[in-house]
Structures are given as C-alpha cells and as structure tokens.
C-alpha cells in the first residue's frame, strides 16, 4: 500500500513537471508571436525560460530520487529489524525455556548450540552494519599488509561450511597458484565472506558453489564465486551492488538479508583499487561474482 | 489435547516453540511457509485449535495467509507473531483477521498465556452453545433463524437479534436479512461484549482488558478498527451508525433498538 502511494507521488511529480513546462512554452510562444519588438527582451526571456525549465527538471529528478531512497531505507530498516530481532527472540526463548523447565543434559547441550549459532548470526548482522558505517566514512585509511589470498579464502570457506553445515564437496575451493595481494585483511576477508555467504544462501537446499582464484594479468588477481542458484536478471546485475538494494519480488522474501553485503564487497574492491561485478546468463542459470584486486609485484 | 499449528520459517524459533508447547501438552505441527499452512488447513476443515503465524515468511507473507484463511471461512483463532511491532503492523494484522498479536522477542510465559486465552475463548463459545441447547429453543433459533428472525429470543446467550439482524455466537455468523456474514472469533467476542452491556457506554480500555485480556499500554486504536468492521456489517449506513454508537471521549455504546429515524 505504501509502495503504491509512492509510485503515485512519483507519477504526480513527473506529470506536474511536464505540465508546467508545457504551460511555460505555450505562454512564451504566445508572447513572442504577439510582441517581439525588442531583441533584448527576447534574449532575456529565453534565458529565464531555460533557467526555469532546468529548475523544474532538477526539482523533479531530485524528488523522485529522494522518494526512491526513502523506499529503500524503509525496506532496509524492515530487513535489519528482522535480522536483529529474530536471533534475539530465539536466544531469549531458549534461555526462558532453560530457566523454567527441567531439561535433560542432551537437550540442554542442543539448546546451548542453538543459542551460540544465534549469537553468531546476530554478531554477523551487527558487524555488517558497522562495517557499512566505517566504509562510508571518507578518509578512513586502509590497514595495508601483504595477504595470502588463498589462505583468506580457505578460512572463509571453512567458516561457511561450519556455519551453514554444508559438506566440502558442495562448497569447493579450487585454489590456483599462490597469490599475494596488498590489502586490509579484515576488509578483504569480509568481502570474500559476503560473496560466499550469498552464494550459499541463494542456492537453496541444493548447494553447489565453487570458488576459483586466478591471475588476470600483471596487475590483478580475481576471485570467482560461482553458484547454481536462481541467477540474476540482466537489469539487476549492477543494481545489486547498491546500498540497501535487494532484488525485487519473491527472491528477496525467500532469502533474508540486510541488502548491505554486496555494497560492502564493491566498496572494499574500490578502496583497494580493484572492482567487483556479477555475471549471470539470466534467471535459473546460476550466477558468478567476481572480485578483482591488485596484485603485489 | 489441543492442536496447534505453528507457521514459522526460522528453524531455531519453531524448534523452541515446539518444545515448549509440547511441554504444555499441546500437539504441535510446524510448517515453514504460508503456502504449506493454507494447504494443510484446506485439507481438513478445522483440525487445529490455534494457529501461531509468523509475518515475515518466504513466499506469501503472514498477512496474506491470514486474510486467505478468513476469506475461505477458516476461523481458527490465530495469534500473529512478528519482528515488526509498529502500530500500523499490528492494525494490519487485526484488519487481516488476526485474533491476537505478539511482537518478537516475546516472553515465553506471555506467549503461552495468550495461546491459553485463545483456547479458553473457544471453549467458552462452545460451552455457551451447549448450555442453551439444553435449555430451550435457543440452539434451534441459532440454526433456523434465517427466515424467521423474530423468533430468536432477545439476549439469549448464543444468539441475539436486533432489528432485521441476528448474531449467532456459536456459528460465528451475522445474518442481515437474507445475507450471512462470517465473523472472526475476535469480532464475535467484541460484539458479544457490547451486546452484554447494551445501552451503557463501554470504554476502549475496558474492552481491551476484558475482551483481549490486555493490561499493557496496547494501542486502543485496534478497537476502533474492529468497530469499523462491525459497523460495515450491522449498520445500513456505516457512516451514520444507529446501533453501534461512538461515545465521545469514552468508547462505544451498543443500542439494540434505536429510535426510528424520521
């Protein structure tokens, strides 16, 4: 309902802008036809008209952009609320259960494990939000050091295998030649982790993810994360890297997240002088995410 | 043993809920999606006594599941559970036909108390039906009132007639002339409460306490929402109510036999 209201207001502002511009042109043409004796007035008129039209166009553009941004923020706050409250609700439920009922030792251990997993999830979301804040700060320096890329990926893969309980053959790392990059270890690890998390989360029940590293040329190395998931429509390939953006429709409701992961990946790549992009043959064809980072010579 | 259907896709939460509800001696069935819940409910008319429904589900959301259930005539008492606790979300839930609403994170004791409350209300409705069945033609009136509204005894416990309308508290139905409107358990409870206090103004707060059993500072606008819906059923012109009157600054007053309009 809210979204429909916003669409309406976007349409309204565009219509109003177009309407105003046509009225101005009409009035102006009328005026020129009836009274065009003085050249200076004509020139001034054209100038003023240009200024007014530019003003209206700019105003409309900004309004529409602002409405879109608000829409995304709402969606983001909803998603974050869910991501923060769900694990808390779960931890609280188990704590209250432990507090009020007599429970045998096996069950007790199971509850502890569940609560630990929930606190991991909570921490993950909090870190994601804080990292987005840090990346947004201009002038924050990278903590550069020489990083063994293969080692970082190995760590991330092991973490994901444990977290999502996927067997080694479903989440496979085909390491290429040893590659060293110059980068901020924490940020690179976050970027790689986000790509792996996404690939696993969007794969559904049948996880088949492969990660490959390769030397692109003398300057860059690439990390390719390929999944057999639902794929990405062509129009969304660039959009998905924007902050708060989530693929519209069924997919976003099926896979929960904050819409920050890929924004972090792209920002990390940029800060390191590299880039990140997605490739997909279309819906149902799986997708590949590529992170390109500069190599140490 | 009461049966509870839990619709929740977060496995940790649904496992925890199952454990606790089973410890309370309820029979629990968990499904992960709204689609699965609707399918299950459609398979048998009312095998469940209470539904615990999450809002943010994969696929169709909880609000949609709720209104689908109601539009299909499934009036199982339903408690909605959600991370979003904004007043507009709560109202949206009630508007979709929910009987109760709880936001995450919730207290276990409160959740169980609310489920018990829903079960109890269902039992009361059943009990009041049985009482009148024993006494006289009350139950008869409730099942045959359609053509012969006048014969419904006024202020009977299971049915009540006013003007050309009659409410059947057991069948959860409102009949207006030839039309039959299904009501939700909460709508019936609100209406029953107002009818019981016929002629006297009742405050929103009092209704929240006595119908919902809420003592917290819940938004009393939820009540207004119910009144709007009830007026749509029982008033000839909902914008100029004659039976369900607003008492400014207090709440509402039900009038069974309003003075004729000139």
Image: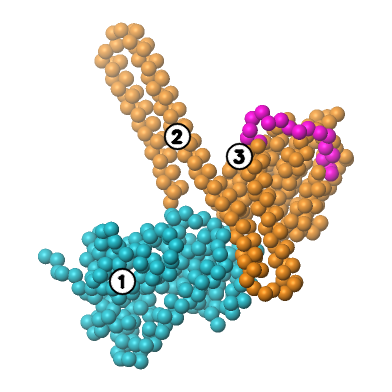
Chain colours: A orange, B cyan
* Residue B118 location (% of width, % of height): 47, 73
Marks 2 & 1, CB-CB < 8 Å contact: no
Return the mark for residue A63.
2
Q: List the residue tagged with mark 1.
A: B194
Which residue does the image show at 71% across and 59% down from the upper left?
Answer: A116
Rounded to the nearest angstrom, the CA distance separating label 2 from label 1 is 48 Å
Q: List the residue tagged with mark 3.
A: A242
Q: Residues within 10 Å of mark 2 (few under 14, many from 20)?
A: some
Query: Do the residues at pointers 3 and 2 share their chain?
Result: yes
Foreground: disc 1 or disc 3: 1
Tell me which chain the residue with mark 2 is part of.
Answer: A
Tell me which chain the residue with mark 1 is part of.
Answer: B
* Residue A276 location (% of width, % of height): 70, 37
- Give above or below for B2 relative to A269: below
* Residue A203 location (% of width, % of height): 69, 55
| Magenta-colored span | A135-151
In the image: residue A169, left or right of residue B73: right
Return the mark for residue A8.
none
Rounded to the nearest angstrom, the CA distance separating label 1 from label 3 is 53 Å
Q: Secondary structure at mark 3?
A: loop
Tell me which chain the residue with mark 3 is part of.
Answer: A
Which residue does the image show at 46% across and 56% down from the upper left?
Answer: B89
* Residue B245 location (% of width, % of height): 25, 64
- Give above or below for B111 relative to B152: above
In the image: residue A294, left or right of residue A243: right
Residue B36 seen in the current view: no
Q: Camera-side residue: B31 or A34?
A: B31
Q: Secondary structure at mark 2?
A: helix
Q: Residues within 10 Å of mark 1 (few under 14, many from 20)?
A: many
Does the magenta-highlighted stretch encompass residue A147? Answer: yes
């Amino acid at each position: 309902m809210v979204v429909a209201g916003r669409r309406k207001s976007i349409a309204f502002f565009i219509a109003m802008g177009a309407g105003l511009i046509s009225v101005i042109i009409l009035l102006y043409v009328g005026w020129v036809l009836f009274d065009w004796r003085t050249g200076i007035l004509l020139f001034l008129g054209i100038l003023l008209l240009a200024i007014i039209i530019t003003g209206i166009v700019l105003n409309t553009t900004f309004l529409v952009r602002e409405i879109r941004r608000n829409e995304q923020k709402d969606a983001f706050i909803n998603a974050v609320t869910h991501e923060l409250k769900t694990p808390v609700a779960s931890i609280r439920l188990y704590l209250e259960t432990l507090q009020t009922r007599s429970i045998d030792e096996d069950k007790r251990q199971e509850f502890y494990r569940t609560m630990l997993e929930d606190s991991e999830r909570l921490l993950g979301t909090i870190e994601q939000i804080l990292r987005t804040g840090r990346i947004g700060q201009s002038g924050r320096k990278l903590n550069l050091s020489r990083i063994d890329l293969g080692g970082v990926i190995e760590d991330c893969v092991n973490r994901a295998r444990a977290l999502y309980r996927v067997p080694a053959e479903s989440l496979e790392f085909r390491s290429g030649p040893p590659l060293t990059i110059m980068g901020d270890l924490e940020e690179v690890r976050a970027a790689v982790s986000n790509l792996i998390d996404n690939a696993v989360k969007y794969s559904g029940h049948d996880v088949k993810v492969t990660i490959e590293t390769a030397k692109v040329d003398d300057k860059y190395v690439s990390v390719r994360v390929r999944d057999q998931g639902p794929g990405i429509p062509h129009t969304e390939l660039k959009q998905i890297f924007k902050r708060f953006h989530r693929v519209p429709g069924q997919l976003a409701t099926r896979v929960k997240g904050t819409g920050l992961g890929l924004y972090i990946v792209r920002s990390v790549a940029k800060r390191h002088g590299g880039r990140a992009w997605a490739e997909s043959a279309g819906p149902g064809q799986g997708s590949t995410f590529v992170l390109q980072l500069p190599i140490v010579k | 043993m009461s049966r509870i259907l839990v619709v929740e896709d977060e496995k940790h939460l649904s496992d925890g809920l199952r454990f606790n509800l089973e410890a309370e001696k309820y029979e629990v069935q968990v499904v992960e999606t709204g689609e699965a819940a609707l399918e299950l409910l459609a398979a048998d008319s009312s095998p469940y006594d209470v539904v615990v429904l999450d809002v943010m589900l994969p696929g169709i959301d909880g609000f949609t599941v709720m209104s689908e259930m109601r539009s299909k005539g499934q009036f199982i008492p339903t408690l909605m559970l959600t991370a979003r606790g904004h007043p507009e979300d709560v109202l949206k839930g009630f508007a979709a036909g929910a009987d109760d609403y709880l936001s995450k994170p919730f207290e276990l004791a409160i959740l169980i108390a609310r489920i018990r409350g829903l079960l109890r209300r269902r039992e009361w409705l059943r009990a009041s039906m049985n009482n009148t069945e024993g006494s006289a033609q009350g139950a008869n009136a409730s099942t045959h009132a359609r053509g012969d509204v006048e014969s419904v005894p006024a202020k009977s416990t299971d049915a009540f007639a006013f003007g050309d309308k009659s409410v059947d508290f057991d069948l959860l139905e409102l009949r207006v002339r030839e039309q039959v409107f299904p009501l939700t358990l909460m709508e019936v409870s609100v209406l029953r409460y107002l009818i019981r206090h016929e002629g006297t103004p009742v405050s929103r707060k009092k209704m929240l306490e006595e119908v919902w059993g809420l003592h917290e500072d819940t938004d009393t606008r939820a009540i207004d929402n119910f009144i709007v819906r009830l007026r749509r059923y029982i008033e000839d012109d909902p914008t100029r109510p004659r039976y369900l009157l607003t008492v400014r600054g207090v709440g509402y007053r039900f009038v069974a036999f309003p003075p004729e309009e000139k």
